[in-house]
Amino acid sequence: MFGQELLNGVVVGAVYALFSLGLTLVFGIHRILNLAHGAVFMWGALIGYFAVTGAGLALLPAFILAILGGALVSVALDLLVFRPLRRRQGDEFGTIIVSIGANLVLMHLAQQATNAQTLRFPFGIFPIHFYHLLGLRVSLQQIVIVAAVALLVIALVLYLFRTNLGTDARAVAIDERTSMLLGINPHAVYFGTFAIAGALAGAAGVILGIAFNSVSYLMGEPIMLQAFVVIVLGGLGSVPGALLAGVMLGVIQTLTTVYISSELSDAVVFGLLFVVLLARPRGFFAGLHTEHRVA
Amino acid sequence: MDSLRLDRLGKHFGGIEAVAELSLAFAPGRISGLIGPNGAGKTTVVNMITGLIQPSAGRITLAERRVDGALPHEIARMGIARTFQNVRLLKEATVLDNIVVGFHRHEHTSLLACSLGLPPVWRERRDFRAQAHNLLTRFGLVEFAARPAGTISFGHQRLVEVMRALAMSPDFLLLDEPAAGMNDVESRNLGAIIRDLAADGVGIVLIEHNMRFVMEICEAIHVLDSGRLIASGTAETVRRDPAVIRAYLGG
C-alpha cells in the first residue's frame, strides 16, 4: 500500500513542480512575485476544457492549445500589468499588488465564462488503463502525466542552460543593467520568461483538470498556496529546488492524507516548511540569481 | 567620418555640474585618452555615452545617428561597448558564458525556434561558444573557461570583461580604467591588445588614472577637470600644459 501511495504522491507532486517552476522562474530572473500565476494555470485548464467540449478537439491538440493559451495569458499579464509599472520604475511590492488585481480580473472573467460552475470533462476522455509494475497499479494517465512533466522540464533546462536565449535570461537574472549594456533587450527576455512560465502553468492546469476531472474558476487558488511552499522550500528562483520540493510536497501531502488525516495535511506541510526554514533559511538550493549581485 | 561625437554635452546632478559644455570627437581606429583628476566627470561621460544616465544638455551622435535618448541595449547594438571601473561580470556564470553573452549582438534565434529546438538554435550556440573559446585562447585564459567568473583573479576578470566587449564586435570600445590593479606585464599586454584593436579599425576611448599607460598608447589625450575640457592634444603637449599641471598638482 505504501508504495502505491508514494507513487500517487509523486504524480501529484510532479504537477506541483511544473506549476511552481514558472513561478520561481519569473521570480528568479525578474524578481517579480506573480500572484496571478494561479489564474494562468486555471485559464490553461479552461482553454483545454473548451477545446475538448466546445471545439471537439482530441486531447493532444487541446493540451497544446492550453499550453499556448497559458503562454499568451502570461505574456499579456507582463505587457499589460507589469511592464507599465516597470516603465514608471515601480518597486517589488508594487508588482505584488498589481498581480493580485490581475488575478482577480482573470478569475472574474473565468467566473463569467463558466457561470461559476465546476466543469467536468466528458466521461472516458482519457482511456482508463492500468498496468502492473513491481506490484503497483500504475494507470496510463499517471504514466502520461509524469512523462509530460519530464519532457517539459527537460525542455526548460535545455533552454536555460543550452541555448543563447537562455544564457541571456540567466545574465538578466544576475544583473539586468549590465546585460543591457551588452545589447540584451530586456523586454525580449521578459517576454520569453513569461511565455515559458505561462506555458508550464497552462500545461499543469490541463493535467490537473483532467486528473481530478474538475475545472473551475477557483482552481488556481489552492495550488498557489502549495506553490509558495514549494518555491520557498526549494530556494527562490531555483529550478532543481522547485522540482525536488514539488515532488516532496506531493508525496508528503498524499501520505498525510492517507495515514494521518486529510484535515491535517496542510498543517503538516506548513509545519514542515517551518522546520526546514529553521535549518536552511534559503531553502534547498540557490536560485538563478544570488545575493552577490554586482553593484 | 563615422566618428563618435559629443556636442556641448552637459550633466548636472541637482546643483552639481558633473560635466559641462563638453565637445569632443572620437575617430574610428584611433586610441583616445580621457584623463583627469578624481571627480573630473570621466565616468559620467562614459555613462552618458552608453545610456546609463541621460545628459542634461547637448547631444551624442555616432555616424550622424543620435545616441543620447536611446536605451542602453539599443546603444550597445549601434556598436558601442564598454568595460567598467569596478568589473561587472556575471560572477556566478562561467567565464565562457560571460563571453557568450557578449555575442548577443549577433544573435538571430527566436523564442519559437528555441522552443521547437530547431537546428539553427544549436548551431548558433555552438558557433558562439567556439568563438568565445577562440577569444580565450587568444588572451591566454582558455584554462579558466569553465570556472565561475567571480573566482578568477581580478586582473583576469578585467581581461574577461574586455573579451566580452570584443565579442560584440564594437565600432567603439570605452575602457574605464582597464589597467587598474594590473601589474606591469599585464598592462603591457593589455596595451598591445588595445593597439591591435585600433589597427583593426575599432575606436578606443581609454579612461585612465595610470598616466604612464595613457601617455604610452594614446594618440590623442583629452583632459577633464571639474567636468570641463581643459586641454586636448598629444601626450607631449598635454604634459606641458600649465592648466593640466595645475589640475593634477592642485593650486
Image (cartoon, rainbow, N blue to C red):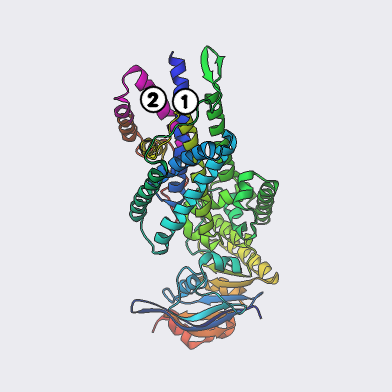
Amino acid type assigned to the residue bearing label 2 in the image: Ile
* Residue A175's disc number: none
* Residue A286 in view, yes or no: no
In the rendered image, the residue lying farthest to the top is: A135
Q: Quadrant of the C terminus of chain B?
A: bottom left
Please tell me whether mark 2 sits on a helix, a strand or a loop: helix
- Specify start and end residues of the magenta stretch as a single range: A240-269
* Among the two numbered marks 2 and 1 on one chain, the one whose residue lies closer to the N terminus: 1
Q: Residues within 10 Å of mark 2 (few under 14, many from 20)?
A: many
* Residue corresponding to mark 2: A252
Q: Residue A168: where, in percent of width, then height?
A: 55, 53
Q: Nearer the viewer, residue A177 or B198?
A: A177
Q: Residue B122: where, in percent of width, then height?
A: 67, 46
Q: Nearer the viewer, residue B250 or A257?
A: A257
Check the image and report above or below for A128 versus B183: above
Check the image and report above or below for B49 versus A108: below
Prevailing SS of the magenta stretch = helix
Q: Nearer the viewer, residue A20 or A294?
A: A20
* Residue corresponding to mark 1: A10
Please tell me whether mark 1 sits on a helix, a strand or a loop: helix
Q: Are marks 2 and 1 on the same chain?
A: yes
Q: Quadrant of the N terminus of chain B?
A: bottom right
